Image: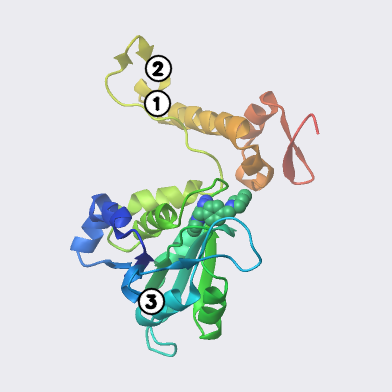
Amino acid sequence: MRVDVVTIFPDYLAALDLSLVGKARRAGLLDLRVHDLRDWTADRHRTVDDTPFGGGAGMVMRPDVWGRALDDVLPEPGADVTGHLVVPTPAGEVFTQRHAEALAREEHVVLACGRYEGIDARVVEHARSAGHRVSELSIGDYVLNGGEVAALVMIEAFGRLLPGVVGNPHSLVEESHGAAGLLEYPVYTKPPSWEGLEVPEVLLSGHHARIDRWRRDRALARTAARRPDMLRVLEVDSLDAADLAVLAELGWVVDDGRLRTVAE
Ligand code: JDH
């Protein structure tokens, strides 16, 4: 897979030399190139921004500079390789595992990292009219200073899904099982006693059926406490009688094929 990142802070992307993504690059599974947007400026000061039309605070990134950069980095429309432009923005759809899965299937992804108040809106419009697929995505409801950290998040999320990147594909299969269902149960390792805290006895028992039940109960309790939104959309057919009993203890009941709290 080919990935290009365009940014005024190429050093931000240095972390992509490390860990799993770095290994994927060295193994030739990921051809990742980071570009300095200022290479496409045309003035002595290498200007990339200007004041916003209509007024307001801050600066906006110029469309002409971005246009030249993307013309060079995106594949020619109609080429045998198709490109997908990803623009991290606080005004985007929320990036999820579904987006990561779709991007991992692409041949070529270009990430355009903005700064200041963002990129002139005509850049996205122009890329779409040229026939490119464009996704404006946000990594969550908090404010960053630019798109670089969001690009890192997205590349790590789709990079680990590329065939051959994660050592044991079984872990990916196991992951997709739980995905969009329940939060994970808590995990423990040695030593069994640490700082006066004990690993739950059941996990040392070797009793696999009881261990599975305990993990399922912890996952249900955690999800109810931290992510009630996930319980509300859960497929109730995926729940057994023991699940429903635990959920009832926590104040959740099935109503018209969906879970809801007894209070509502
Ligand atoms: C790309 C520039 C900085 C900061 C205006 C927006 C009030 C606009 N999840 C995410 N958070 N932030 C980003 C992100 C931020 C970026 C750029 C991505 C390019 N910036 C910037 C503030 C505003 N602000 C929030 N409103 C509630 C107005 C740009 C991001 C992603 N992905």
Amino acid type assigned to the residue bearing label 1 in the image:
His
Position of residue 21 relative to residue 206, above or below, is below
Which residue is the site of mark 1? 207
At x 64% / y 46%, what residue is drawn? 234
How crowded is the residue under tag 2: few (<14 C-alpha within 10 Å), some, or many (20+)? few
Disc 3 on helix, strand or loop? helix
Of badges 3 and 2, nearer the viewer stands 3
Image quarter of residue 3: bottom left
Mark carried by residue 201: 2
Residues under labels 3 and 2: Cα distance? 59 Å
How crowded is the residue under tag 1: few (<14 C-alpha within 10 Å), some, or many (20+)? few
Query: In the picture provided, is 37 more to the left or to the right than 217?
Result: left
Mark carried by residue 69: 3
What percent of the width, then of the height, locates residue 148? 40, 56
The quarter of the rendered structure image containing the N terminus is bottom left
Position of residue 216 relative to residue 111, above or below, is above
Residues under labels 3 and 1: Cα distance? 59 Å
